[in-house]
């Protein structure tokens, strides 16, 4: 099967539902944490995150913990008859020898197509995209308690107010943010984020969500993550960067718990995203990887509470 195309088609179908649908679904699922493997504890990456988030909301699953069929059997559990798995993609370089434990390898995430440079790809040979299927712990009977408890674990720092958590991210990144403009935007040439006055947003949560969206754009500056797509996407480069910011802001908003907030003024890009994805079956894998990089860059700079900073100094 053409796994790249199958995954792309699934995400295109999500986007076609409209921004108010996929944003709410992804952010609500993200507030429960990144999808993880129930046997290894490793988080899933890239486009697989979007697929698993959507499946979690569609199935009404409270947990973001997943297993392959073989992994479930290996811990003495059984996927219930009639349950359907979620198709995911695993990238790996062509190996000289075939491995018999492929299912175990695929279940742990693996490479992302967008992470491989042309030079590395030439040295390593063909990059293979293989399918694997995951089942949520809610679809499996007889799981050991340690796997069940992994799914019930509360997200870290979930007791903080969403607006406070967003402000800690914005403050920690120390981006230049100016208010008093007609619409939200990030200007790379000036390296500054521009926002309307706070009173012009529908809520403080939406103000924070919009600012975080622009903060994802801010991470792409040459002095930071240095994102550039002109040669690959040509005239569609701007739309692709907006897709990266859309996915990255979903990750960040979920991290903050901004599940009901709205990124204001960005609904018009959906048609452009769909055009990019329909024209390039590998684009979503690259976009998801870059969005994760931006998310990690922002979260690593989150401002600690005063008590946390004092405790760290005393420990040192």
Image (cartoon, rainbow, N blue to C red):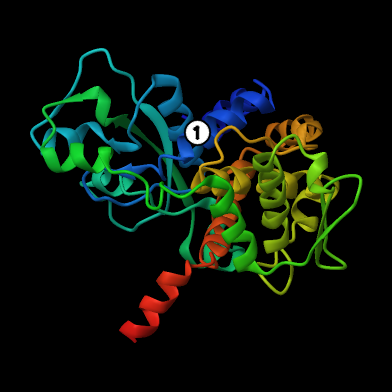
Q: Residue at x 77, y 39 (%)?
A: 201
- Which residue of the protein is positioned furthest toward the left in this rendering? 76
x then y, percent, for residue 111: 44, 54
Left or right side of 153 for 51: right
| Quadrant in the picture for residue 146 | top left
Residue drawn at the location 75% of the way across and 53% of the way down: 232
Q: Quadrant of residue 190?
A: bottom right
Where is residue 191 shown, x and y percent of the image? 81, 67
The residue that mark 1 highlights is 28
Q: Nearer the viewer, residue 41 or 108?
A: 41
- Tell me the quarter of the picture where residue 130 sits: top left
Residue 298 percent across, percent down from the top left = 58, 61
- The answer to which of 99 and 256 lies nearer the viewer is 256
Report x, y in % for residue 160. Answer: 46, 50
Quadrant of image for the C terminus: bottom left
What residue is drawn where x is 48% and y is 59%?
125
Against 1, residue 300 (above or below) is below
Q: How many marks?
A: 1
Tell whether 190 sits left or right of 14.
right
Q: Which element type, helix, strand or loop, lies under badge 1?
A: helix
Towards the viewer: 312 or 127: 312
**Would you call the spot at circle 1 few (<14 residues within 10 Å), some (14-19), or many (20 or more)?**
many
Residue 211, relative to residue 54: is it above or below?
A: below
In the rendered image, the vertical position of residue 95 relative to residue 268, given as above or below: below
What residue occupies the far top of the structure in this picture? Answer: 82
228 left or right of 8 in image: right
């Amino acid at each position: 099967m053409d796994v790249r195309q199958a995954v792309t088609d699934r995400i295109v179908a999500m986007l076609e539902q409209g921004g108010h649908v996929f944003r709410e679904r992804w952010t609500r699922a993200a507030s429960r944490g990144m999808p993880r493997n129930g046997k290894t504890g490793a988080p899933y990456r890239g486009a697989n995150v979007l697929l698993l988030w959507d499946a979690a909301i569609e199935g009404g699953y409270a947990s973001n913990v997943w297993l392959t069929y073989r992994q479930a059997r290996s811990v003495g559990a059984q996927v219930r008859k009639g349950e359907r798995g979620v198709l995911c993609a695993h990238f790996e370089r062509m190996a000289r020898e075939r491995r018999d434990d492929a299912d175990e390898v695929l279940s742990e995430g693996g490479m992302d197509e967008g992470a491989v440079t042309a030079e590395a790809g030439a040295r390593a040979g063909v990059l293979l995209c293989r399918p694997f299927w995951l089942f949520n712990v809610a679809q499996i009977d007889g799981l050991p308690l340690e796997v069940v408890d992994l799914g019930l674990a509360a997200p870290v720092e979930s007791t903080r107010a969403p607006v406070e958590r967003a402000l800690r991210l914005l403050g920690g990144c120390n981006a230049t943010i100016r208010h008093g403009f007609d619409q939200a935007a990030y200007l790379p040439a000036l390296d500054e984020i521009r926002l309307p006055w706070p009173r012009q947003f529908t809520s403080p949560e939406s103000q924070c969500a919009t600012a975080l969206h622009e903060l994802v754009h801010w991470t792409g500056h040459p002095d930071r993550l240095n994102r550039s797509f002109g040669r690959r996407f040509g005239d569609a480069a701007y739309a692709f960067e907006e897709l990266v910011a859309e996915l990255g802001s979903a990750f960040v908003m979920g991290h903050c718990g901004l599940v009901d907030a709205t990124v204001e003024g960005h609904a018009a890009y959906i048609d452009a995203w769909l055009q990019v994805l329909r024209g390039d079956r590998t684009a979503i894998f690259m976009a998801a990887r870059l969005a994760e990089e931006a998310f990690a860059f922002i979260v690593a700079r989150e401002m600690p509470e005063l008590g946390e900073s004092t405790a760290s100094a005393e420990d040192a």
